[in-house]
Amino acid sequence: MQVNIQIARPFLPLITKKYRIKLYYGGRGGGKSYAFADALLVRATRKKLFAVCLREVQESIRDSVYKLIADRISVHGLPNWQIKADEIINLKNGSRIVFKGLRDQDPQKIKSLEGTDIAWIEEAQTITKKSWEILEPTIRKDGSEIWISMNREAENDPIWVAVGSHPDERTLVVKVNYCDNPFCSEELKIQAEKSRQQNPEDYAHIWLGEPVRQGHTKLMNAEMVRRAFEAKIISSTSPLIIGLDIARFGDDSTVFCFRKGRLCSRFEVYNQYDTVEVANLTTHFIQQYHPARVFMDIGGQGAGVYDILKDRGYGRIVRGIYFGEKAINSDRYTNRRAEMWDSVRAWLGEAVQLPYDESLLDELVSVNKKYDKMGRLQLEEKEEVKKRLGRSPDKADALALTFAEPVYDTGEDTFYGNGRITIEKMFSDANRLSHSSRNEW
């Protein structure tokens, strides 16, 4: 039966070539999932076959590519396919597509896959060595194929070591990135170019499919922070944003961060303040400096402060933020904390100003990053940072909170003339700004 589905050229071997193993890897925007789903439907529509879609962990059918395949059937208007609760079948030729998690299967259950024609392993960078060693000899039917799609995470991803690093004549290994995908949207291309300019190493991993370099786990490096310490901005007409990180535990600090566009002028740090005292301080800053927004952490004690401020009539200005809540751009970040901290990283890539503060530097470079199975940025838990740093990164969190939501900004920054100042004057002016700016708002 002819199937009118257009497959991008790099993925045509999934349909036209005979290999025992077909491994595709690359970065975001390469179209691997869509192409694999479409190719599987082409094969299963043309001829009866039994296909299994596998991943390391599948707690429910929603964790699999079940919905993706169902959606592609609908997009292409393919007849004769029935979407059942836990499998997808072709009523005309009897093809079946089922979905399983490898970690949930004992060896005996995995042996039930012996009659598989095509086994598609998705998110293969998460597959363990043990799972692969059990699965590979189980897919033993003559002519059977194992399809592998992955975004490489580390140099020693088990399935890469076993298959991709030294492919034999029966193994096809293809790298596909957004620039190879004719269906990649212009918006994704713009995001990729922005990433390339701002952070080449992140670009190489996220967009080009390169593994994370060993040791390259920091979200920010000291060099970019120290550049921000150099005095370069005299003033800014951008709206004032205050980030408020409220102490959760006895040894944490309550920190206010004051930022106008590219100029972060100062931090106010308070210890052992109760809910009412923090609310009173915030009220004072709102009345004195008239910020456009106060973004505050409302986990723990923060919820009480937020309620008091709303009751006092500041609900238009104050916004409550949970670090662990869903990100605004949930396709790129696991939560708001990762999203806000990455905004700080991007901001530091511009000509910006921070008050000279070695403790702030320590906090900003203390956080390690990684990526989840969907390629989204994820930060290590705050408690892990606190153990390594010896304290909570309260100043850095307050700065991150100033990026919680976009604020309309038509302001301009006033820079020193052509940068013609001495190093001594830069640090002198930076110290002057950090001590005197509290009276200049």
Image (cartoon, helix red, strand yellow):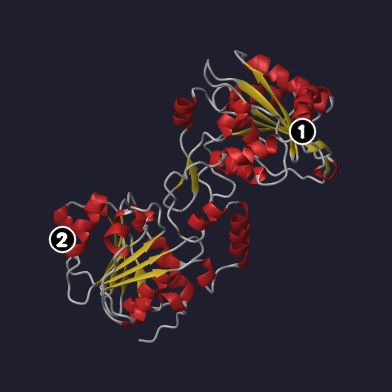
Q: 248 or 381: which is nearer to us?
A: 381
Indicate which disc, 2 or 1, sits on the residue closer to the N terminus.
Answer: 2
Q: What distance separates the C-alpha of mark 2 from that of mark 1?
A: 70 Å
Q: Residue at x 83, y 45 (%)?
A: 418
| Residue farthest toward the left in the current orientation of the protein | 108
Dot 2, how many residues are within 10 Å of its Cα: few (below 14), some (14-19), or many (20+)? some
Foreground tag (2 vs 1): 1
x and y percent of residue 394 in the render? 58, 26
Residue 223 lies, with reference to residue 96, above or below; the image says above
Question: Could you tell me the amino acid type at mark 2?
Answer: Lys
Q: To which quarter of the image does residue 244 belong?
A: top right
- Read off the residue under disc 2: 111
Q: To which quarter of the image does residue 232 belong?
A: top right
Could one spot residue 355 in this view of the protein?
A: yes
Q: 280 or 147: which is nearer to us?
A: 147
Q: Residue at x 25, y 53 (%)?
A: 129
Residue 113 lies, with reference to residue 238, above or below; the image says below
Question: Could you tell me the amino acid type at mark 1?
Answer: Met
Q: To which quarter of the image does residue 44 belong?
A: bottom left
Q: 69 or 27: which is nearer to us?
A: 27
Could one spot residue 80 in this view of the protein?
A: no
Q: 342 or 219: which is nearer to us?
A: 219
Residue 256 lies, with reference to residue 367, above or below; the image says above
- Read off the residue under disc 1: 426
The secondary element bearing badge 1 is classed as helix
